[in-house]
C-alpha cells in the first residue's frame, strides 16, 4: 500500500541498523495497523467535507513535529545536513503529488480495494526502473509485473461497476507517482539515511502545502477536528514504525509485513462502512502481493550475488 515514505532499496539501509528481526517485524506490523487507521481517518474526514489537501497538510505537519525529536534521539540534527538539496526538492514535489493522489483514492474507493491497488507500488517501481535507472529486467521480473497487473484487473474488474472508474484511475496514478518516489529515494539512499530523507520531505513540503491552505483551509466542528488529529497521530506513528523497522531488520525481512494491511482494511471497512471486500478483491490481491514479494526477493537475491 501507499507508505508515508516508500522504502529505500534493499541495499541502502542506514549504517546504524541493528539486527533484531523480531522487533523489526513487530514494528512493521504495528505501522501497518496505524497506516490503515490513518487512511480510514482520511476517508472519514473527506466525507465530512475536509479537502484532500487539508488532510495532506495536517498529516505532514504531524510528521514535522515527529521528525525533530526522532532526529535528536537518533543521529542528531547535524546528521540531517545534505549536499543534495535539489534531489530532495524533486522528491518533495513528486511525493506531494503521490500523497495527494493516494489520499484521494481512499476517499473515492472502498478502503480494502484502495489498499489492494496500493500494493502495486513495488511492481510499478520495477517497471519504472527500466526507463529511469536503465536497469535490466529479466524474464522473472517481467513475469511478476504481468501477474501484478493481472491482479489489478481482477480487483478493478473494468466494466463491472463495483469500483468507480475515476477512483481506480486516481489510485493507479497514485501508485505510479509513489513508485517514482521510490526511485528517487533509491538515488538518495546512496548518501542519505531514511531519517534524513523523511525529515527534508516533511519540512520542505510545508511550503507548498502552507500556500495551498490559504485557499482550501476551513473551519470544522469538534468531531471533524478530532478525526483530523487522529489521522495525524496515526500517520506519525506509522512513519515512526517504518523508520525503526528499517533500523532493526533488513528490508527483505520487514517488507512482507506491509501486506497485513489488507486484513485491517477489510475489518475497518466492515466495522465502519459495512463494506466487505467482494470476492474479486480476495482473488486479485494475492496476485498483486505475490508479484511484489517475488520482486523484493529477486532484487535482494541479486544484490547479494553482486556483493560476492
Image (cartoon, rainbow, N blue to C red):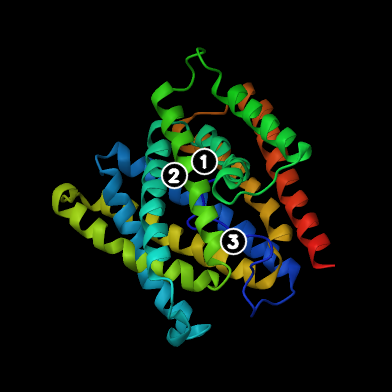
User: Disc 3 designates what residue?
Assistant: 8
Find residue 10 and report its horizontal and vertical position in percent.
Answer: 68, 61
Give the distance between the C-alpha atoms of the residues marked 2 and 1, in whole angstroms.
7 Å
Q: Residue at x 54, y 48 (%)?
A: 132
Q: Residues within 10 Å of mark 3 (few under 14, many from 20)?
A: many
Q: Is residue 201 visible?
A: no
Rendering coords of residue 169 (x, y %): 44, 29
Label 1: which residue? 268
How many residues crowd around disc 1 within 10 Å: few (fewer than 14), some, or many (20 or more)?
some
**Which image quarter holds the C terminus?**
bottom right
Which mark is drawn over residue 40? 2
Taking the spot 44% from the left edge, 46% from the top edge, the residue there is 39
Helix, strand or loop under label 2: helix
Q: Percent from the top left, x then y, of residue 116? A: 58, 36
Q: Is residue 86 left or right of residue 53?
A: right
Where is the N terminus found, in terms of image quarters? top right
Amino acid at each position: 500500500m501507499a507508505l508515508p515514505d516508500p522504502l529505500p532499496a534493499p541495499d541502502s539501509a542506514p549504517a546504524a541498523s541493528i539486527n533484531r528481526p523480531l522487533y523489526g517485524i513487530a514494528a512493521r506490523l504495528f505501522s501497518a495497523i496505524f497506516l490503515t487507521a490513518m487512511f480510514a481517518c482520511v476517508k472519514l474526514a473527506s466525507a465530512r467535507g475536509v479537502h484532500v489537501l487539508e488532510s495532506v497538510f495536517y498529516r505532514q505537519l504531524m510528521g514535522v513535529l515527529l521528525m525533530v525529536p526522532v532526529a535528536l534521539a537518533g543521529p542528531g540534527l547535524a546528521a540531517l545536513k545534505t549536499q543534495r538539496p535539489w534531489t530532495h526538492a524533486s522528491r518533495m514535489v513528486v511525493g506531494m503529488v503521490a500523497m495527494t493522489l493516494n489520499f484521494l483514492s481512499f476517499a473515492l474507493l472502498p478502503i480494502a480495494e484502495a489498499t489492494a491497488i496500493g500494493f502495486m507500488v513495488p511492481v510499478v517501481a520495477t517497471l519504472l526502473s527500466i526507463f529511469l535507472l536503465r536497469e535490466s529486467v529479466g524474464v522473472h521480473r517481467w513475469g511478476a509485473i504481468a501477474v501484478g497487473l493481472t491482479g489489478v484487473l481482477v480487483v478493478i474488474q473494468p466494466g463491472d461497476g463495483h469500483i468507480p472508474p475515476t477512483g481506480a484511475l486516481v489510485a493507479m496514478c497514485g501508485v505510479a507517482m509513489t513508485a517514482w518516489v521510490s526511485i528517487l529515494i533509491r538515488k538518495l539512499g546512496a548518501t542519505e539515511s531514511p531519517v534524513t530523507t523523511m525529515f527534508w520531505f516533511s519540512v520542505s513540503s510545508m511550503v507548498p502545502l502552507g500556500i495551498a491552505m490559504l485557499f482550501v483551509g476551513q473551519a470544522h466542528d469538534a468531531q471533524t477536528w478530532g478525526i483530523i488529529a487522529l489521522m495525524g497521530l496515526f500517520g506519525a506513528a506509522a512513519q515512526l514504525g517504518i523508520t525503526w523497522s528499517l533500523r532493526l531488520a533488513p528490508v527483505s525481512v520487514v517488507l512482507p509485513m506491509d501486506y497485513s494491511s489488507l486484513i485491517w482494511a477489510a475489518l475497518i471497512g466492515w466495522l465502519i462502512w459495512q463494506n466487505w471486500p467482494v470476492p474479486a478483491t480476495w482473488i486479485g490481491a494475492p496476485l498483486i502481493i505475490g508479484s511484489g514479494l517475488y520482486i523484493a526477493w529477486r532484487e535482494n537475491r541479486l544484490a547479494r550475488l553482486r556483493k560476492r
